[in-house]
Amino acid sequence: MGEMKGVKVLGISGSPRKSHTTQELVKTILDATDLETEFISLHDMTINGCICCLGCIKDNVCKVRDDYIPLMHKVLEADAIVIGAPNYFGRLNALTHSFLERFYCFRHDKDGHGGMKLSGKVGAIASVGGGGEWEMPGREIKMYEIAGDDIKGFFDYNEIECVGLVAAQGAVACFSCGYGEVCRVSGVKKFFGKDVKITPEIIPCLEKQPDVMNKAKLLGRSLRERLEKNFEEYN
């Protein structure tokens, strides 16, 4: 098989925080593809939600002027997209949700006959949650899987084939807010007991989750294999 020249994978970290679990997980998946990749963090961007103005109907160009506009072109040009995000309050965080809402501009083809401009692309998901294996009331799903489950819904809507999902334990804000050892509703206390003392040794990070890192690398390789199949079919 020939080299997959021009095949590109776009990685998006939807966390408002820079250089933390979500970003590292997305980068691990990208690196494992061994393809041309581009990584973008949304942490310092202003991305508003879709306002349903329908201005994109005829030309597939979003009319809301903010930092999403250059990303819109990158998403359309990529062969695959890796999206990572944390769960906030038991839901996909707002920044990532706004970014994915704006995919509405890809809903109609240029001739107005319907269809999805992203149909046929492949994707992978990195899901992070500070609540770990706790289950979200009413959803019967682990906290670190919630963001990924919501992203998968956007993938399905846009006809993006999801190759897989990797979930990781993040660090709840209680570890760094200053009240984690005394607050009545501290997530740290729920993990380690009421008399817990916060030390670097107990703060979750990817280095302490080698199984997750291995899954992320395997997911990157699976993404490459799926792209190789597409490449063979169309070349």
Image (cartoon, rainbow, N blue to C red):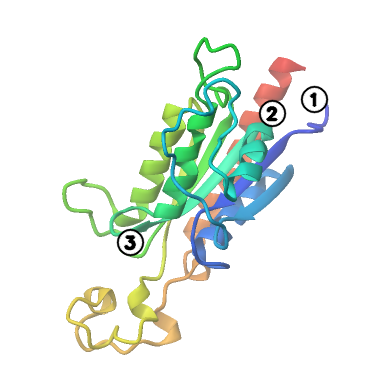
Q: Are marks 1 and 3 in contact (CB under 8 Å)?
A: no
- Whether 142 is drawn above or below 16: the answer is above
Residue 47 seen from this side:
yes
Query: Residue 130: x and y, percent?
Result: 35, 65
Q: Classify residue 190 as left or right of residue 51.
A: left
Q: Amino acid at mark 2?
A: Glu
Q: Amino acid at mark 1?
A: Met
Provide the residue designation for mark 1.
1
Q: Classify residue 10 as left or right of residue 169.
A: right
Q: Classify residue 81 as left or right of residue 135.
A: right
Pick the front one: 80 or 225: 80
Could you tell me which residue is drawn at 48 percent across and 57 percent down?
212
Pick the front one: 166 or 9: 9
Give the CA separation, mark 1 to mark 2.
9 Å
Q: Classify residue 182 as left or right of residue 23.
A: left
Query: Residue 61: x and y, percent?
Result: 60, 31
Q: Amino acid at mark 3?
A: Gly
Could you tell me which residue is drawn at 53 percent across and 56 percent down?
46
Q: Secondary structure at mark 2?
A: helix
Provide the residue designation for mark 2.
228
Residue 31 seen from this side:
no
Q: Residues within 10 Å of mark 2 (few under 14, many from 20)?
A: some
Could you tell me which residue is drawn at 54 percent across and 51 percent down?
216
Give the CA separation, mark 2 to mark 3.
34 Å
Q: Are marks 1 and 2 in contact (CB under 8 Å)?
A: yes
- Whether 124 is drawn above or below 5: the answer is below
Residue 132, numbered label: 3
- Whether 79 is drawn above or below 116: the answer is below
Which image quadrant: the N terminus?
top right
Give the CA separation, mark 1 to mark 3.
41 Å
| Mark closest to the chain's N terminus, 1 or 3 | 1
